[in-house]
Amino acid sequence: MNIEIREYHKNDISQAVCIWNEIVEEGIAFPQMDLLTVNGGDEFFSLQSYTGIAFDKDRGELVGIYILHPNNVGRCGHICNASYAVKKELRGHHIGEKLVSHCLSKARELNFKLLQFNAVVRTNEKALRLYKKLGFVKLGIIPDGFLMKDGTYEDIVLHYYVL
């Protein structure tokens, strides 16, 4: 794979929505319950502080996406938040690590001071290992903070990263 991380463009929308919706449909990581449409997805991705696309030059297709945006406003507007999605059949090929690393650089470039994760699901072990590897600090656990697709609740793990 020859992965390039670049900014989202409107012509990415169909593939970007498919990758994003895979995560939403799984119901075990993203808080959203509704799938994105092409029109709604373009608006959603365009309104972020930055939307990054992982493009595989060898395959000629999108293989991942991330969004970066403020976690709060005003006096807390220097803290950002992000979400990452990798095409299901390509997970485990370090695309997520490339997305997170690019996101950290972009967050610094946009003058954010911290990146905070509000809801990493405890059973998302691959993400938890990656965040530990990259130096994220675990803040604590919110018991039953995430409603899983099957109707059960799972703990969420809060993290931050000083930019």
Image (cartoon, helix red, strand yellow):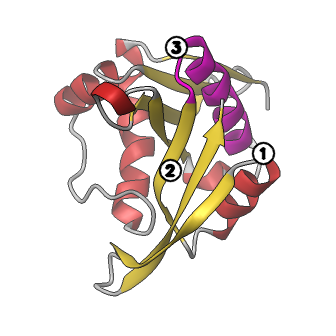
Q: Position of residue 6 (x, y in %)?
A: 59, 15
Q: Main secondary structure of the magenta part?
A: helix
User: What's under tag 3, amino acid-wise?
Assistant: Leu
Residue in the image at 56% along x and 23% along y: 107
Instruction: Name the residue tied to disc 1.
Output: 134
User: What's under tag 2, amino acid-wise?
Assistant: Phe
Check disc 1: other Cα within 10 Å, few if <14, some if 14-19, many if 20+.
few
Q: Position of residue 12 (x, y in %)?
A: 42, 21
Q: Nearer the viewer, residue 149 or 115?
A: 115
Looking at the rendering, which quadrant does residue 33 occupy?
bottom left
Magenta-colored stretch includes residue 146: no
Check disc 2: other Cα within 10 Å, few if <14, some if 14-19, many if 20+.
many
Rendered image: mark on residue 117: 2
Element marked by disc 3: loop
Asked if the residue under mark 3 is in contact with the one under mark 2, i.e. CB atoms within 8 Å, the reply is: no
**In the rendered image, the vertical position of residue 84 relative to residue 51, given as above or below:** below
Q: Which residue is the extreme one toward the bottom?
A: 152
Residue in the image at 66% along x and 69% along y: 125
**In the rendered image, the vertical position of residue 51 relative to residue 125, given as above or below:** above
Task: Compute the Cα span from label 2 to label 1.
Answer: 14 Å
Instruction: Name the residue tied to disc 3.
Output: 110
Rendered image: mark on residue 18: none
- Give the quarter of the figure containing the N terminus: top right
User: What's under tag 1, amino acid-wise?
Assistant: Leu
Residue in the image at 70% along x and 49% along y: 136
Q: Position of residue 4 (x, y in %)?
A: 70, 20
Position of 153 compared to 137: left or right? left
